[in-house]
Image (cartoon, helix red, strand yellow):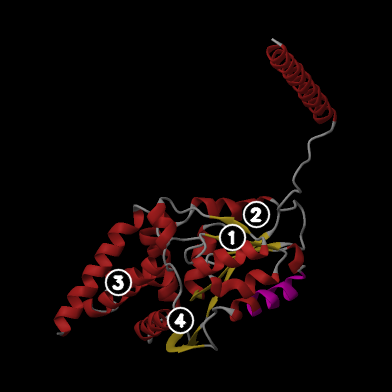
């Protein structure tokens, strides 16, 4: 009996302590809730800052603002207008398929695409290509604009800030896209022309990697911008130099290397692709399937013909 009494005492004592613990926890929770209601909620700093005319935003184009590469879509439009033959189209298709599947910008593939485009436009008038660019935008590019990135650009515009595209694509194409989206303007690769006719050569180098950073730096100086108050957006690790220039870098639909770097640097990330496969290979889950399949088939057909 003595032992049973000891056990009974222990049970009662433990129950009392549990009740006391519960009451204490409830009181602490009530007090915390009252304090939270009394204190004003902490608000995030406004960004972009409305009326800050020394701030601007710089957007990469390919896979950041638009699905795929602008140069490849442009090539598709030129083929439709008989600027080149089926063999050239197959090369463009293969380059586009590789670009979509890899989700990164390979310098050799991009250089090959630029060389192809330069050879195709050689001898044509600049005014002609600008006019065709407007048509190609409607045919192949308009439906490939990422709505999420478009909304980010619009937020800067609504705040009264200038918004620029910065791309390795030909400046004429970039300017068409910027104008159609209501952006301020575009920085792009400049093809040489004499008396309004393309020579098939570039002025300097393609606007790629470090060259983008230099272009942004030069434009900021000319516009009187404070880069620490500016934002930049890109999907590619090649644009880390440009992203590192500004106070507000964003990784948009990032490739694996940029994602790792952004996390290390605590940069903001946005991914507008959908589905596990899209997140892995860097293409929209449904929209890219037809283009990839068609491009791959064309490339295989070309390879077989060469054999």
| Residue count near mark 1 (Cα–Cα under 10 Å), binned few <14, some 14–19, many ≥20 | many
List the residue tagged with mark 3: 93
List the residue tagged with mark 4: 107
Residue mark closest to the camera, 1 vs 3 = 3
Pointer 1 and pointer 2: residues touching (CB < 8 Å)?
Answer: yes
Q: Which mark is residue 157?
A: 2
Residue mark closest to the camera, 4 vs 2 = 4
45 is higher (above) or lower (below) than 90? above
**Res 194 visible:** no
Q: Quadrant of the N terminus?
A: top right
Q: Which image quarter: residue 68?
A: bottom left
Please provide percent x and percent y for residue 19. 75, 17
Q: Which residues are magenta?
A: 214-224
Residue mark closest to the camera, 4 vs 3 = 4
Mark 1 or mark 3, which has the lower sequence index?
A: 3
214 vs 196, nearest the viewer: 214
Q: Which image quarter: residue 34?
A: top right
Mark 3 or mark 2, which has the lower sequence index?
A: 3
Which SS class for mark 3? Answer: helix
CA–CA distance in space, label 1 to label 3: 29 Å
List the residue tagged with mark 1: 183
159 vs 92, nearest the viewer: 92
Is 305 on the left-hand or right-hand side of 132? left
Q: Is residue 43 magenta?
A: no
């Amino acid at each position: 009996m003595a032992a049973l009494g000891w056990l009974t005492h222990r049970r009662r004592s433990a129950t009392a302590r549990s009740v006391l613990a519960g009451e204490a926890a409830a009181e602490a929770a009530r007090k915390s809730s009252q304090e939270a209601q009394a204190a004003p909620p902490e608000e995030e700093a406004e960004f972009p800052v409305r009326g800050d005319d020394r701030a601007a935003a710089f957007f990469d184009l390919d896979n950041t603002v638009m699905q795929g590469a602008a140069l490849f879509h442009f090539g598709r439009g030129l083929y439709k207008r008989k600027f080149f033959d089926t063999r050239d189209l197959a090369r463009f298709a293969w380059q586009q398929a590789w670009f979509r599947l890899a989700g990164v910008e390979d310098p050799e593939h991009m250089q090959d695409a630029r060389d192809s485009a330069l050879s195709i436009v050689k001898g044509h008038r600049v005014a002609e290509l600008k006019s065709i660019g407007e048509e190609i935008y409607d045919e192949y590019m308009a439906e490939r604009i990422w709505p999420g990135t478009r909304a980010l650009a619009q937020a800067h515009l609504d705040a009264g800030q200038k918004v620029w595209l910065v791309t390795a694509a030909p400046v004429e194409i970039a300017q068409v896209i910027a104008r159609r989206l209501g952006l301020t303007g575009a920085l792009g690769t400049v093809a040489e022309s004499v008396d309004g006719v393309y020579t098939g050569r570039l002025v300097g180098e393609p606007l790629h990697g470090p060259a983008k950073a230099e272009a942004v730096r030069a434009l900021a100086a000319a516009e009187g911008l404070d880069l620490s108050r500016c934002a930049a957006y890109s999907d590619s690790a090649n644009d880390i130099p440009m992203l590192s220039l500004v106070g507000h870098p964003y990784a948009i639909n990032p490739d694996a290397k940029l994602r790792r770097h952004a996390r290390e640097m605590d940069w903001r990330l946005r991914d507008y692709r959908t589905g596990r496969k899209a997140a892995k290979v860097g293409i929209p889950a449904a929209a890219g399937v037809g283009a990839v399949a068609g491009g791959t088939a064309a490339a295989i057909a070309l390879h077989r013909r060469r054999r």
